[in-house]
Amino acid sequence: MACKLLDGVTVVAASMAEAGPVVTQILAFLGADVYHIERPSDKEEPRHAGFVLRNSNKKDITLNTKEEEGKEILWRLIEKADVFFENFAPGAWDKMGFSYEEVRKRNPGIIYATLKGFSNTQSRWKKCVAFDPVATCSGGNTYVSGYEGQGPMMCNVNIGDSGGALHGAMEVALAILNRKITGKGTYLECPMQNAVTSFCRDQFAEYYAKGSVRRSGNSYKGTEPNAPHNVYPCQGGDPTGNYVMISCGPDDFGKLCKAIGREELASVPEYATARKRYENRFALDHEIRCFTMTHTKFEVMDILAGQYGIACGAVMSPGELVADSYVSDNILKPVEDELIPGGRMHMPSIPVKIEGEPIEVHTCGAHGSSNADVYMGILGMSEEELEELRRKKII
């Protein structure tokens, strides 16, 4: 069995890029029927990895919403849907006649969710087109990222896109629950700026404690100086990935000294307190590196975390995560499809189990692969009608 928390919920999704598709992918992971709309195409092309990673578990349909006949088919789908979701440029769907006000007239109980970079109703930048870098900058992440004394640095993980998607999916799920209680639909905004700001809790704590925020790079975060706290090189065949993060709490320094075979460091005056250790962190980091360079990153974890209870973590590459049996069994899921280059890949799902039931992952299928299921099964069209729509390039 698989997790089906949203079984019976129907979502019509007009989404693109990463943030929007991931919102509805999460809903699909939880059991919702998601109809992902693509434009019709005369040729079938292989799915690139990015598309599969964002659109698995959905029913792929093609529909030309620029034509009146295509719009009328979309209206028929919306009338039967629980959720309509879109993340196109600001105002795009309003101009096509699918504003919340118009959609609500056709389906009063609809949950209409829209994801943009900024609030559609309150932000002064509501008309701005946005994607992940815009969200991470405007939400506060980029300001606090980077090395001390240097300029801001972009994050290489799409926390604006996938972070915004996580918040968006949560909003939709809560709106579904609310509708079950009240019977009312609603309009939802899921601005990526909001999501990024919500991830900056620790930085706000530092701001209110000190009046400013220090770019910490790989050193300690927070209000109180601490060391050692850094990423250290290790042995191994991958020079870009042979690193381990070590964060030694103020009360664990003696244990760390013992673990690396340098117990005498615990009595050195320059390392007597957390603040002194931070002030002398470069010399202390050298001592730590002398230990880590004689071990692989996993050996360091086994010794420090396993034997001495010191916080540390190996710097893991995507390939190493795929090879890790726990990660592959619980977070990454194998997907097989002849349309995927190589025919097989592992993809992130969501680490959720309801009553022990895992998330089930399956591929998105070919371009328009669910046309018959949706148009004939949901809207009751005949094969002849479907063929005529294909001929006219409506689907």
Image (cartoon, grey):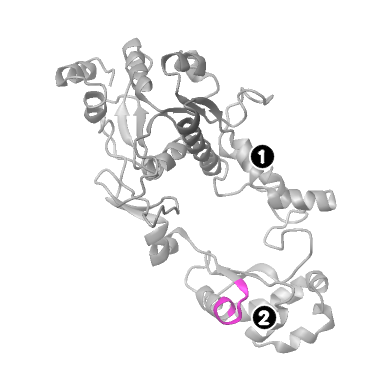
Res. 139 mark: 1
**In the rendering, at what x and y percent does residue 131 appear?**
56, 35
* Secondary element at tag 1: loop
**Residue positioned 67% across, 45% down in the render:** 142
- Span of residues in magenta: 304-311
The reply to whether callout 1 and callout 2 are in contact (CB within 8 Å) is no
**Residue positioned 44% across, 64% down in the render:** 320
**Residue positioned 52% across, 76% down in the render:** 296
**Magenta part mainly helix, strand or loop?**
helix
Q: Residue furthest left?
A: 384
Q: Quadrant of residue 249?
A: bottom right
**Within-10-Å neighbours for mark 2: few <14, some 14–19, many 20+:** many
**In the rendering, at what x and y percent does residue 8 appear?**
34, 35
Residue position for label 2: 256
Q: Mark 2 or mark 1, which is nearer the start of the sequence?
A: 1
**In the rendering, at what x and y percent does residue 318 appear?**
45, 58
**Residue positioned 63% across, 36% down in the render:** 193
**Within-10-Å neighbours for mark 1: few <14, some 14–19, many 20+:** many
Is 243 in the magenta? no
